[in-house]
Image: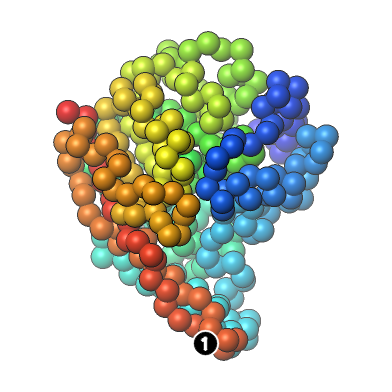
């Protein structure tokens, strides 16, 4: 799809959402996300619901909604990358993360799927690989999917990603399993970025946005399978019919929610009828996030364990110390990985 046509469709969706009164963000969010959903859309969506195409084309470079590493041009010709502690720390994290991907045996997938350049991210190039830190984390998730779920789900399945952001995981699964269908659930403004990312990456894809979903009653499997991607805003979640999803995935964001929203997703029919669950979240959300959730709140006991481990790709970061130094910062809680089949 041509860029102008894609932007036109996105703008039509936004204007229809505003007309229907679906622009206001949800209440009772974690403090971080309450700020983000009010502030970030103003960076690329105008008051009249038109899109700032120049920002959209660079949304990953400008870290719209979510950050990534590197957040700067990592060229070795830039003397600042050798001097400044923050930049050296980020480069160390990127090198360490690649080592983890290799240890896990997922480097062939990274070679097959180097970082997509849509959104104009700063890409780190190292030993023949092209990636960002966030991209590596999803390559790891793809590797786990192939190890534990590929033989069970085959090439035709429907996956729901709760808190999908702009859709890296859905993109990778679609690339690897061409007949799969993907439901991306997030704030509508995040789904604008997903519409752009997936629309540009798969020009011939059948994508259902707000316009296609707004007049529908229940969204069942027959309807879902007519599309490659369904961009489902959070307030349409309950439209998903039971037995319509084979796999529910979530990476990090369930642990960033207040209990009200955690229960909204995991105690509703779409999740209660899903056959497989794939998640990576904190053992304990506090004090980083304003919620009392812990691993004990996740319904892991409803599933037979296929995989459970401490995540090797969610553990620490590096932060600038003064100007020319950096220090290692351990996350307040480690992340667990879980893949299970409903009992």
User: Which residue is nearer to you in this view: 193 or 310?
Assistant: 310
Q: What percent of the width, then of the height, locates residue 234? A: 53, 31
Secondary structure under the numbered disc 1 in the rendered image: strand
Task: Name the side, left or right, on which 1 lies relative to 342.
Answer: right
The answer to which quarter of the image holds residue 242 is top left
How packed is label 1: few (under 14 Cα within 10 Å), some, or many (20 or more)? some
Res. 141 in view: no
Which residue is rendered at x = 54% and y = 43% of the image?
Answer: 29
Res. 28 in view: yes
Q: What percent of the width, then of the height, locates residue 327? A: 45, 81
Which residue is rendered at x = 27% and y = 27% of the image?
Answer: 275
**Quadrant in the picture for the C terminus:** top left
**Type of colouring:** rainbow
Task: Name the side, left or right, on which 176 lies relative to 275.
Answer: right
Which residue is rendered at x = 30% and y = 42% of the image?
Answer: 297
The answer to which quarter of the image holds residue 3 is top right
Which residue is rendered at x = 57% and y = 24% of the image?
Answer: 208
Up/down of 78 relative to 248, above or below: below
Q: Which residue is mark 1?
A: 325
Task: Name the side, left or right, on which 89 lies relative to 294.
Answer: right
Up/down of 323 relative to 228, above or below: below
**Extreme right residue here?**
48
Q: What percent of the width, then of the height, locates residue 217? A: 53, 11
């Amino acid at each position: 799809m041509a860029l102008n046509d894609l932007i036109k469709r996105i703008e039509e969706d936004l204007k229809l959402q505003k007309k229907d009164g679906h622009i206001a963000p949800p209440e009772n969010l974690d403090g971080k996300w309450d700020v983000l959903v009010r502030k970030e859309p103003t960076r690329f969506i105008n008051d009249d619901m038109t899109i700032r195409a120049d920002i959209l084309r660079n949304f990953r470079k400008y870290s719209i909604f979510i950050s990534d590493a590197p957040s700067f041009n990592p060229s070795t010709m830039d003397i600042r990358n050798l001097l400044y502690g923050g930049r050296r720390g980020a480069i160390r994290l990127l090198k360490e993360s690649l080592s983890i991907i290799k240890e896990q045996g997922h480097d062939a997938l990274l070679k097959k799927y180097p970082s997509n350049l849509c959104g104009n991210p700063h890409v780190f190039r190292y030993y023949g690989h092209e990636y960002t830190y966030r991209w590596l984390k999803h390559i790891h998730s793809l590797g786990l999917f192939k190890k534990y779920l590929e033989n069970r789900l085959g090439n035709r399945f429907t996956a729901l990603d709760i808190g999908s952001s702009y859709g890296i995981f859905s993109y990778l699964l679609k690339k690897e399993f061409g007949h799969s269908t993907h439901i991306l659930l997030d704030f509508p403004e995040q789904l604008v970025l997903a519409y752009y990312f997936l629309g540009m990456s798969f020009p011939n894809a059948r994508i259902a946005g707000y316009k296609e979903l707004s007049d529908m009653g229940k969204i069942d499997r027959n309807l879902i399978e007519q599309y490659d991607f369904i961009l489902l805003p959070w307030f349409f979640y309950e439209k998903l019919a039971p037995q319509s999803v084979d796999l529910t995935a979530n990476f990090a964001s369930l642990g960033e929610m207040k209990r009200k929203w955690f229960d909204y997703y995991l105690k509703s029919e779409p999740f209660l009828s899903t056959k497989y669950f794939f998640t990576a979240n904190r053992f304990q959300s506090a004090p980083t996030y304003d919620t009392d959730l812990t691993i004990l709140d996740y319904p892991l006991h409803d599933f037979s364990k296929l995989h459970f481990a401490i995540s090797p790709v969610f553990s620490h970061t590096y932060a600038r110390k003064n100007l020319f130094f950096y220090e290692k910062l351990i996350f307040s809680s480690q992340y667990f990985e879980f893949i299970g089949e409903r009992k």
